[in-house]
């Protein structure tokens, strides 16, 4: 999806969210209609579990209904704000479960079972396709292959450090430093081209 | 953990980045979320990272959630049962064209958004203005149904007003002097009566503003104190 569409979408969502903050039920229904398939896709990718994704989506919209006023007071783009609500709930959910799985998983027999097989494009492809301006695409493209893949998998599939290490067959320390250096580099590059939403 | 200290800034940035990416483990994640609630620097740095990364998320193909998700949300929130579109019949021209516009929007988004659920009329009869201070932070939201002769003004971040002072709401007609809409009380939502339905009363008013005045409002009929908040009127019809 191209950049202008995202900004257009944000431009429409802002006033809708303002109305939701005023407890306007029709605006809320319209917001749901315009955003739920994207937010559901976000949750589904990260959680890889329909029931859990539905649950998170429900909680997220209940929270959006109650807290739309705080969006208006925040400085985010509507699209960023909505996506962050869903992503953060997904990560809270995953990281809560992690305590149980991480202690059970041993190094040789695979760690947490991951089914990353997916009909759609790969996380790295999504990362590149999603970068919605040439300059952002350049920044993503400039990352080395390892960090790029690690960041894409973490971002779209919600993998933890340990899961990334397992999936990429790299030592945990390597993966951690890939992520760290990759993010630093992405920030320098994005801030350098003046990319501020 | 006082991450706001300047010498901790680099560490904060690293934590916020992995928070937004999702790789921060459970405990530091919870700690950072707690810190963000009390320290605005922490919240701001997280938001910056969420914005940077949000630009990467847009290529995800949409997936329609099952209709039960909306049913459960509206049950949990006790929303009124979804109403059918206000105008009846596909032959109604306005409704028909609105429907077409909605379809075009959906197609443009390429999200495959379901048009069946929730089944409501588009919110196409509304005026909204977000009134913000010079720092760009929204303070009040004014909204109105264009057919109703009142505005609802909700405080979302307006500073408290000291005793003996009041906030006064003004229409800002293009090229003419501001016209008062009245003094805002300190209620969370204030209903401001208009002389006519808002679609008419605010028809050629591009913006609203709020000034600080003596209690009871400006004695002169024009703003006397500083303009604290202002915002454009968005028309959604």
Image: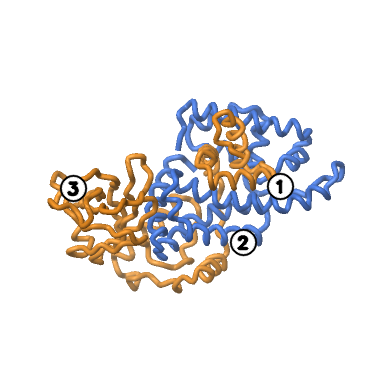
Chain colours: A blue, B orange
Around disc 1, counting alpha carbons within 10 Å, would you say few (fewer than 14), some (14 to 19), or many (20 or more)?
few
B178 relative position to B145: left or right = left
Disc 3 marks which residue? B223
x then y, percent, for residue A58: 56, 62
Residue A71 in view (yes/no): yes
Q: Quadrant of residue B18?
A: top right
**Quarter containing the C terminus of chain B:** bottom left
- Camera-nearest label, 1 or 2: 2
At x 56% / y 47%, what residue is drawn? B60
At x 44% / y 43%, what residue is drawn? A75
For the residues labelled 2 and 3, the Cα–Cα distance comes to 50 Å
Label 3: element kind: loop
* Label pair 1/2, CB-CB below 8 angstroms: no
Q: Chain of mark 3?
A: B
Q: Which mark is residue A55?
A: 2
Q: Chain of mark 2?
A: A
Question: Is the residue at mark 3 from the same chain as the one at mark 1?
Answer: no
């Amino acid at each position: 999806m191209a950049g202008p569409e995202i900004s257009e979408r944000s431009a429409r969502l802002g006033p809708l969210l303002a109305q939701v903050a005023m407890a306007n039920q029709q605006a809320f229904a319209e917001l749901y209609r315009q955003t739920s398939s994207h937010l559901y896709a976000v949750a589904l990718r990260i959680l890889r579990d329909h029931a859990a994704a539905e649950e998170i989506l429900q909680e997220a919209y209940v929270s959006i209904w109650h807290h739309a006023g705080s969006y208006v007071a925040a400085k985010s783009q509507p699209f960023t704000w909505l996506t962050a609500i869903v992503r953060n709930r997904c990560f809270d959910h995953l990281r809560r479960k992690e305590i149980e799985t991480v202690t059970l998983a041993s190094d040789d027999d695979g760690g947490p079972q991951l089914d990353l097989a997916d009909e759609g494009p790969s996380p790295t492809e999504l990362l590149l396709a999603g970068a919605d301006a040439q300059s952002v695409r350049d920044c993503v493209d400039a990352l080395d292959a390892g960090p790029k893949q690690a960041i894409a998998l973490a971002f779209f599939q919600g993998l933890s450090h340990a899961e990334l290490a397992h999936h990429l067959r790299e030592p945990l320390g390597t993966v951690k430093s890939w992520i760290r250096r990759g993010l630093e580099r992405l920030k320098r590059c994005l801030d350098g081209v003046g990319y501020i939403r | 953990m006082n991450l706001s200290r300047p010498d901790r800034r680099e560490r904060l940035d690293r934590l916020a980045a992995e928070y937004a990416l999702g790789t921060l483990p459970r405990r530091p994640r919870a700690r950072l979320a707690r810190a963000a609630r009390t320290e605005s620097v922490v919240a701001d740095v997280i938001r910056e990272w969420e914005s940077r990364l949000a630009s990467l998320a847009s290529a995800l193909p949409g997936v329609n959630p099952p209709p039960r998700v909306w049913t459960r949300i509206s049950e949990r929130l006790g929303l009124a049962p979804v109403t059918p579109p206000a105008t009846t019949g596909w032959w109604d021209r306005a409704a028909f064209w609105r429907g077409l516009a909605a379809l075009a929007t959906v197609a443009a988004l390429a999200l495959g958004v379901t048009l069946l659920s929730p089944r409501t009329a588009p919110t196409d009869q509304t005026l909204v203005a977000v009134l913000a201070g010079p720092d760009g932070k929204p303070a009040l939201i004014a909204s109105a149904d264009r057919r109703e002769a009142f505005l609802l003004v909700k405080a979302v971040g307006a500073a408290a007003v000291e005793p003996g002072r009041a906030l006064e709401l003004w229409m800002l007609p293009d090229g003419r002097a501001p016209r008062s809409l009245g003094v805002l009380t300190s209620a969370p939502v204030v209903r401001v009566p208009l002389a006519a339905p808002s679609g008419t009363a605010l028809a050629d008013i591009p913006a609203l503003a709020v000034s600080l005045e003596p209690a009871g409002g400006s004695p002169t009929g024009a703003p006397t104190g500083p303009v604290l908040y202002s915002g454009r009127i968005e028309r959604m019809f």
